[in-house]
Amino acid sequence: MQKLEQLYEGKAKKVYATDDPRYYIVDYKDDATAFNGEKKGTIVGKGAINNRVTNHLMQILAKEGIPTHFVKELSDRETLVKKVTIVPLEVIVRNIVAGSLSKRIGVAEGHKLQRTVLEFSYKDDDLGDPLVNEYHILAMGWASEQELKQITDYALRINEILRAYLADLNIDLIDFKLEFGKTPEGELVLADEISPDTCRFWDSRTGKKLDKDRFRRDLGDVEDAYQEILDRLLGR
Ligand code: TMP
């Protein structure tokens, strides 16, 4: 597979065309941003770790029947993925109160929610990815009713699969963000990444944060936390 021109550069990844119109190559960067790009830095080795963590988790989900964009890991930072059009929504799944939800409703981080919470943000950096609901999504045509139902079903199922899998590794899945895409054939698939950049992972024995909050909040040990997640996933 030949890597052709760069199509897009995001905050954490670049996307390239290939000589096969069905596929793109994603290339993970070590760049880290937070608060919609206001805070910038580098997490050494992050790109390679997020590439492997994402691919590992996507393959577990695929085995459980969740369609994903993953095709093949090409190198430590590069992965071949299906070409999709991203649904312009960040789909956030929460099991425990943390982050922006803690601030929004005035409940301390760590409070266990009585049931899973699903939130949607409209993907627009200039607007700071505003929170939206089902009515906005359907009224704006960001997704159809059928797509929204499928996204909701997939997100809740992904939560169950990942929560159980991570619990066995002594990792609590606090919350996470998903993105979905549509293939040219119209199939809805899980896209983007699932990594310590896009999830909150807390060690279930010590409560230690093993995710990007260490960077966002200047907690130190950032690289070690990312490595720890990869090591546990790989059984090291
Ligand atoms: P939040 O508490 O800041 O809304 O974040 C909820 C989850 O979504 C958390 O696991 C981090 C993830 N997330 C992203 O992946 N990208 C983002 O831009 C934001 C704001 C959060």
Image (cartoon, rainbow, N blue to C red):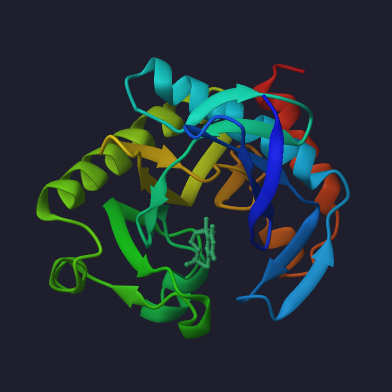
Q: Quadrant of the C terminus?
A: top right
**Residue 31 falls left or right of residue 71:** right
Query: Which residue: 79% across, 30% down?
Result: 76
Query: Which residue: 36% across, 78% down?
Result: 105
Specify whether residue 202 is in view.
yes
The relative height of residue 234 versus residue 47 in the rendered view (above or below) is above
Who is closer to the viewer here, 205 or 57? 57
Query: Which residue: 49% across, 80% down?
Result: 128
Counting from the top left corner in percent of width and height, residue 146 is at: 12, 47
**Residue 32 falls left or right of residue 124:** right
Counting from the top left corner in percent of width and height, residue 88 is at: 37, 62
Query: What number of labels is visible?
Result: 0
Counting from the top left corner in percent of width and height, residue 176 is at: 47, 51
The relative height of residue 138 versus residue 232 in the rendered view (above or below) is below
The relative height of residue 102 versus residue 179 in the rendered view (above or below) is below
Query: Which residue: 48% across, 73% down?
Result: 100
**Residue 192 falls left or right of residue 155:** right
**Quadrant of residue 216 within the rendered picture:** bottom right
Specify whether residue 167 is in view.
no
The relative height of residue 42 versus residue 103 in the rendered view (above or below) is above
Q: Quadrant of the N terminus?
A: top right
Q: Residue furthest right?
A: 44
**Residue 109 falls left or right of residue 161:** right
Who is closer to the viewer here, 65 or 21? 21
Who is closer to the viewer here, 15 or 18? 18
